[in-house]
C-alpha cells in the first residue's frame, strides 16, 4: 500500500462563505456526528459537524467548513444508507456492516454471517426478502462481468419491498452519464433481478416500483456515488502517520453509499480524507488546517498516480475532467 504525500497546501483554492448558497447545515440532532463537544456543559456529547452543504461556482453541491478545522481533526462520521459485501468476501465479512469475521465456519460456506446480534437485527430490513429468491443467475452476471454496483441495487430493492427504505432513497444524489452500451448492460441486469423476484412469487404491489427506469436511475447514481470499502484495522487510526488514497482491489470488502460523503467534491490534492477502520462506518478527517468557508474535498482515486493516469481514471470512472490546481499545473 503506497504512501501519499500531501505537500501542496499553500496554493489551494479557497471558497468564501459569501460565494456560496447554503443548502444544508447540521444540528445536534443530525444523523452525522463529529468529535467536537456541543458546549462546555456537555463535554461527553458530540456537537454537530462543522460543515454545511452549499452550491459551488462550477461543481454543483459541495461541503464547506463552518469554522476552522485543524489538521487531523475528525470532521464527522457517517453510516451507509446502502452497503453490500464483495462476492469474493461475502463469507468472510459481516453481511450487514462488512466487519471482517474472526472465524469462518466452512460447514456454513453457502450461508452469510453477521458479526453481532445487532447487525442481524438491522439486516432484517433486507435479508429476509433476499433469502426468498435464488440469486445464482444474478450473481453470476455480476461475477462474470466484474460488476459490483448491481449488488447494491438488489439490496435496495429488497429494502424497499420490506418497507425498510423508500424507492426514491437515492434520488438526491447526482446520476452518472450513461452510454448506450452501459444502458444495454443494465437492462440485462434488470431482467435478471426482476426474474429472481418473480420466480420466488414476489409480484404485484411489492414490485410496482421495480421498473427498468428505476433500476437504471438507481444504478446511475450508485455508479458515481458508491465508495469501495477498504478496512485499515483498529490499530490504524492516525491518518497523518500513514496516508493512502487507495488500496489494491483485493483489500476491498465491499461497497457502500452514503449521503453526506457523497456531496464531497474531488481534488487530486485533497484537504480531507475518508477512512474505514473496522466496518462500513465512514470517518472523515482533515489532512491539513482548513479555514472557515473553505470547501472540503477528498480524492476519489489513488492520488499517487501521475497526471495522465489520474485524468484517465476520472474520465472513464466518474465522467469528468479534473481541473484542480494540481492537474492544471501538470503535476
Image (cartoon, helix red, strand yellow):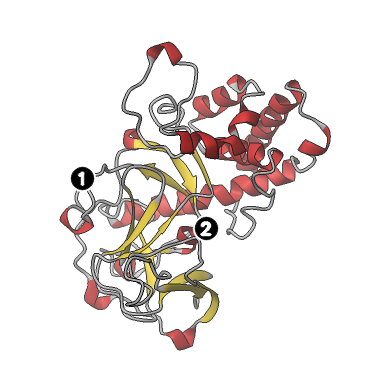
Q: Residue at x 77, y 37 (%)?
A: 206
For disc 1, the marked residue is 235
Above-or-below relation of 75 to 132: below
Above-or-below relation of 80 to 90: below
Q: Residue at x 46, y 41 (%)?
A: 255
Q: Determine the CA span between mark 2 and mark 1.
A: 27 Å
Residue 151 in picture, x, y percent from top left: 55, 35
Q: Label 2, secondary structure: give it.
A: loop
Give whichever of 106, 227 is nearer the camera.
106
Q: Residue furthest bottom?
A: 18
Q: Residue furthest right?
A: 204
For disc 2, the marked residue is 259
Q: Quadrant of the C terminus?
A: bottom left
How crowded is the residue under tag 1: few (<14 C-alpha within 10 Å), some, or many (20+)? Answer: few
Question: Residue 215's quadrant in the figure?
Answer: top right
Q: Is residue 34 visible?
A: yes
Above-or-below relation of 120 to 280: above
Q: Residue furthest front?
A: 41
Q: Is residue 59 visible?
A: no
Q: Residue furthest left?
A: 241
Residue 166 in picture, x, y percent from top left: 68, 50
Q: Label 1, secondary structure: give it.
A: loop
How crowded is the residue under tag 2: few (<14 C-alpha within 10 Å), some, or many (20+)? Answer: some
State which tag comes first along the sequence, 2 or 1: 1
Which of the two discs, 2 and 1, sits closer to the camera? Answer: 1
Amino acid at each position: 500500500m503506497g504512501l501519499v504525500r500531501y505537500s501542496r497546501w499553500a496554493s489551494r483554492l479557497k471558497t468564501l462563505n459569501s460565494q456560496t448558497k447554503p443548502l444544508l447545515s447540521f444540528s445536534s440532532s443530525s444523523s452525522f456526528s463529529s468529535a467536537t463537544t456541543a458546549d462546555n456543559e456537555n463535554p461527553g456529547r458530540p456537537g454537530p459537524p462543522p460543515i454545511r452543504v452549499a452550491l459551488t461556482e462550477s461543481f454543483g453541491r459541495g461541503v464547506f467548513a463552518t469554522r476552522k478545522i485543524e489538521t487531523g481533526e475528525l470532521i464527522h462520521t457517517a453510516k451507509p444508507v446502502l452497503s453490500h459485501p464483495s462476492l469474493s468476501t461475502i463469507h468472510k465479512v459481516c453481511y450487514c456492516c462488512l466487519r471482517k469475521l474472526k472465524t469462518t465456519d466452512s460447514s456454513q460456506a453457502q450461508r452469510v454471517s453477521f458479526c453481532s446480534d445487532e447487525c442481524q437485527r438491522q439486516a432484517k430490513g433486507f435479508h429476509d426478502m433476499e433469502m426468498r429468491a435464488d440469486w445464482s443467475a444474478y450473481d453470476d452476471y455480476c461475477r462474470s462481468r466484474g460488476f459490483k454496483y448491481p449488488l447494491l441495487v438488489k439490496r435496495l430493492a429488497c429494502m424497499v419491498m420490506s418497507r425498510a427504505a423508500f424507492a426514491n432513497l437515492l434520488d438526491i444524489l447526482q446520476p452518472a452519464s450513461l452510454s448506450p452500451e452501459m444502458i444495454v448492460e443494465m437492462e440485462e441486469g434488470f431482467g435478471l433481478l426482476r426474474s429472481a423476484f418473480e420466480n420466488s412469487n414476489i409480484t404485484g404491489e411489492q414490485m410496482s416500483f421495480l421498473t427498468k427506469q428505476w433500476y437504471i436511475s438507481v444504478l446511475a447514481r450508485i455508479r458515481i456515488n458508491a465508495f469501495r470499502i477498504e478496512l485499515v484495522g483498529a490499530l490504524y487510526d492516525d491518518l497523518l502517520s500513514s496516508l493512502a488514497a487507495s488500496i489494491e482491489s483485493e483489500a476491498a470488502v465491499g461497497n457502500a453509499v452514503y449521503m453526506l460523503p457523497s456531496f464531497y467534491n474531488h481534488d487530486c490534492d485533497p484537504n480531507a480524507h475518508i477512512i474505514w477502520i473496522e466496518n462500513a462506518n465512514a470517518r472523515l478527517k482533515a489532512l491539513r488546517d482548513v479555514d472557515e468557508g473553505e470547501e472540503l474535498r477528498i480524492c476519489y482515486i489513488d492520488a499517487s498516480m501521475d497526471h495522465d493516469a489520474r485524468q484517465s481514471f476520472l474520465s472513464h470512472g466518474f465522467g469528468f475532467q479534473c481541473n484542480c490546481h494540481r492537474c492544471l499545473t501538470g503535476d
